[in-house]
Image (cartoon, rainbow, N blue to C red):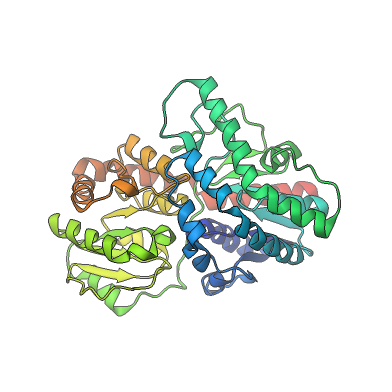
Amino acid sequence: MKIIILAVGTRGDLQPFIALAVKLKKKGYDVLVISSKNEKDFVSAYGLSFFPLDVDIQKLMEREEVQEMAKGNNPIKFFISHFKNSKNLKLLMIRTLGQVWEACQKADVIIYHPGMPIGFFIAKELDKTSILVNPFPVIPTRNYPSILFYKGPRLGKIYNSLTHAIFKKLFWSISKPSIEAFWKEHIHSNIDLKTPPIVQQIKSGMPVINAYSKYLFSHDQSWSSNIYTTGSLIIEEDSAYFPSAGLEKFIHKGNEPIYIGFGSMKDAKSFDHYLSMIIEAVSLTNQRAIVGLGWNLIESTKKLPDNIFVIENIPFSWLFPRVSAVVHHGGAGTTAAGLLAGKPTLIIPHHADQPAWGLRVFEMGVGAKPIPKAKLSSAKLASGITSLISPEIKERAQKLGSLLRSEGGVKEAESIIEEYIRSRN
């Protein structure tokens, strides 16, 4: 049986799907991962088959219109910025959807990220199984506000429902224009483009997997029985990764370092500014730090002090158990990796779901109060780091990490998928 896994986005978007792909392959399934071409080496390192889409997410993130979207620091600004800058992105997406369509023709099952809802429509057109995997909350509930409105006021269950209704429409409006244009030009069959695909997926009875912890965002008992909350999908083994001698030496030559990195969300044009800020904050707190560049190459001529070590992309499941605390932008995958490792967390949210993760970490007492990117300074970063190294926060983070690891998210998700496949055969 051939399982297609469709996840296009940043490394944080992709990593949970790699964890699931590895688990399914070990169970004997023929698994193909579809993602952007610059992820080929990362995916192939886990022995997985890979279909490269002709889109470079690294370069896409550096485009002016995407950088502009990243400045949207509240839900309304984020969506307005998206629509204003979406014309060129729509053309790129239409071309990419054609490649996804071709790659999925032999699929028996299509597992897809909520940001790639084309997976649902292709599976329906081919009369195959579709499975939605959500790394962050997208299913409407009265219990808490939509993730894009989470840092806003708490006005009760009716307000919560309203925020989810708004999110549902706006989130679908991002993908709908390119899917509609592609389908009309190339496929021609009738599909329901009025109803958000998340709603259609739930009504289909096929699995919807919330790949985050119920301890972070609770499972609503009123949801239909095909909705599951499994816990985070984390790569269990990173035997494919071997650290450099320099990194190994740095980790072991002193007290445990802090990890600081903003992944693909960092503005490449302001590299020196952020690096200077990090160096000063780390010095003020008498700490050592591993600074993650993500996709961003070193563009600075600044000489690094001995207490700073700069890395490019490496697996967080390998790195985070070896650091004392983590500071990052608050992507769902990065947040999950830090919390599963039991590490105190400080989030510097940029946009989208990141403010919600930052606030949730702070609410649970396992990290410092989030610092919005626009308000970040050396002094505020130093204050946040000081909070992270307090014994109370460290103890709570370790306890939460134990709870999250006990969920066994990737094993649970794989079992749900296997059981559904068996029920259909």
Residue 406, percent from left and from top: 44, 46
Q: Is residue 412 visible?
A: no
Q: In the figure, is residue 227 to the left or right of 398?
A: right
- Residue at left offset 43%, top offset 46%: 354
Q: Is residue 227 above or below residue 183?
A: above
Q: Nearer the viewer, residue 407 or 170?
A: 170
Return the x and y of residue 156 as percentages of the image width and height: 48, 20
Query: Which quarter of the image is occupied by the N terminus?
Result: bottom right
Apparent side of residue 61 relative to residue 314 in the rendered image (left or right): right
Q: Quadrant of residue 208?
A: top right
Residue 340 visible to the viewer: yes
Q: Position of residue 204 (x, y in %)?
A: 75, 40
Numbered circles on residues, count: 0
Q: Is residue 213 left or right of residue 26?
A: left
Q: Is residue 57 above or below residue 145?
A: below
Residue depicted at x 51% and y 68%: 59
Residue that appears at 71% across and 56% down: 110
Q: Residue furthest bottom?
A: 245
Question: Within the image, what quadrant is residue 258 found in?
Answer: bottom left
Residue name at image x 81 percent, y 46 percent: 191
Q: Is residue 146 above or below residue 374?
A: above
Question: x%, y% of residue 101?
Answer: 75, 62
Residue 245 to residue 223: above or below: below
